[in-house]
Amino acid sequence: MELPEEIRNDELTLELIPPPQADWDEIQEFAMTFSGYDYWGSFNACAEIANAKRHDSLTDLRTCLFFEQRRWRHFGMSPDEEAMAYIRQLVAGIRDKVASENSLVPISNYKADLVQRYWDYQQSHFPDWEKFFECPRALDNRPPVFLRKEAWRNLIINPGASQSEIKCLLSLIPEPYRHKWFRSMNSSQALAQSILGNLTINRSLECLEELKDDDGHALLGKAQVSADSFSMEKKIEHLGEPRSTSLDGYFAGRYQIAIECKFTETEVGNCSRPRLEPSASNYKTEFCDGTYTLQIPRKERCSLTKIGVLYWKFIPEIFVWDSDKDIKPCPLNKNYQLVRNILAVGVKLDGTTSIFDSHAVLIYDERNPSFQPGGNGYTAFTETRQALKEPNMLRKCSWQRIIQHMRISNVLPWLTEELRLKYGF
């Protein structure tokens, strides 16, 4: 595509922005459609914004990208690996800003539509609501929530299943490992157990071997895909965490996969340290302002490092981020859970790392605006993937893609039908 010499912000569309894996020549062409020197009136004004890495607005992002093009043109060479990762981050930021401004479906509408479907499902499947739910249909648009003793009914179970099969399904996530809101029909954990759990106990996980991710790569790569190699709520205990990482899904073997399952969430999972309240007992020593910098009274840039967490020991071996330099904002602040999952399988029990024999998978609802371009989940995925030395260590796929593949393969048709009725998949 031949780009015009100048593209105003209000003329910018997603089609005009380079794709995530565009080469430097294509990015340069796009960068020059905005003249930072002319816009800000001087070289110094443009340089001040670019060197401060100000990313607050679309204009700021385009200014930074323009200046990077000018910088490397002056050097007479192509950007090195670290610089290219930053440049791709700028392009992704521009794409997300444009997509966000053109978003069609507010998150509130998405959730309201789901809640309407849930209550219809309740009326058809559990008409005697008092036996199963905390309250009747609420006026504040809350989803149905099962009684504690009936929480297991939030799973989709084969009507013809034997007691042993039901027990086997429930055992994949024992009650102590259920999330706080497992009883809500919005629970991503209950959704994951309904789909991945039923595929497991019915020895049908192998149907996913041919499934492609959103970029056309094999979703499960070289993993050994079987019920014997798969588990849910897998605890990872070699990263020095006070509370061990728990993976939603996990494939063991020489090639390992960590699976992160999302549904109605508005993000993939942020770092907790910037959210510490002043009343917390560890506030003075572990609060973080969201930057990877030295902050009094710590001698480490990351407050988690101070308490023995090993993330930043291994991050430089898998990501382009340098643990010995300040980074603003901290790349783990908004991308924490994805980074943690990648480390969970990229770091081995003996402390070695590999970027070629494991990857993480993000599964999401394609209707959720947070996982569409411009949304928090989409942005976290893009930023994390672009920072990987081996980008294929992070892949994503929607629940819709998985369920459609099951339908085409005629795998557990009773399950796909119930997923349609309950969730609209």
Image: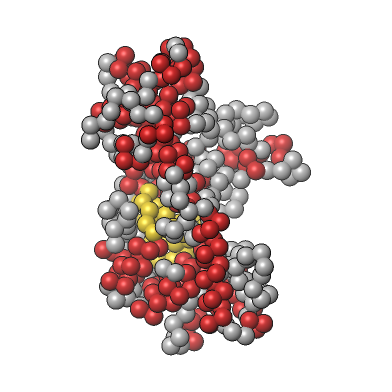
Asked if residue 241 is positioned above or below residue 2 in the image, the reply reads: below
Image side of residue 345 versus residue 241, left or right: left
Image side of residue 1 versus residue 342, left or right: left
- Residue sitting farthest toward the left: 1
x, y percent for residue 82: 37, 29
x, y percent for residue 304: 59, 40
Residue drawn where x is 32% and y is 71% of the image: 406
| Residue in front for this viewpoint, 321 or 277 | 277
Asked if residue 247 is positioned above or below residue 174 in the image, the reply reads: above
Residue drawn where x is 41% and y is 68% of the image: 425
**Badge count:** 0
**In the rendered image, is residue 132 in sight?**
yes
Image side of residue 301 versus residue 397, left or right: right
Residue drawn where x is 35% and y is 29% of the image: 7
x, y percent for residue 205: 34, 70
Residue drawn where x is 35% and y is 78% of the image: 413
x, y percent for residue 325: 49, 26
Dividing the image into 4 quarters, which one contains the N terminus? top left
**In the rendered image, is residue 148 in sight?**
no
The type of colouring in the image is secondary structure
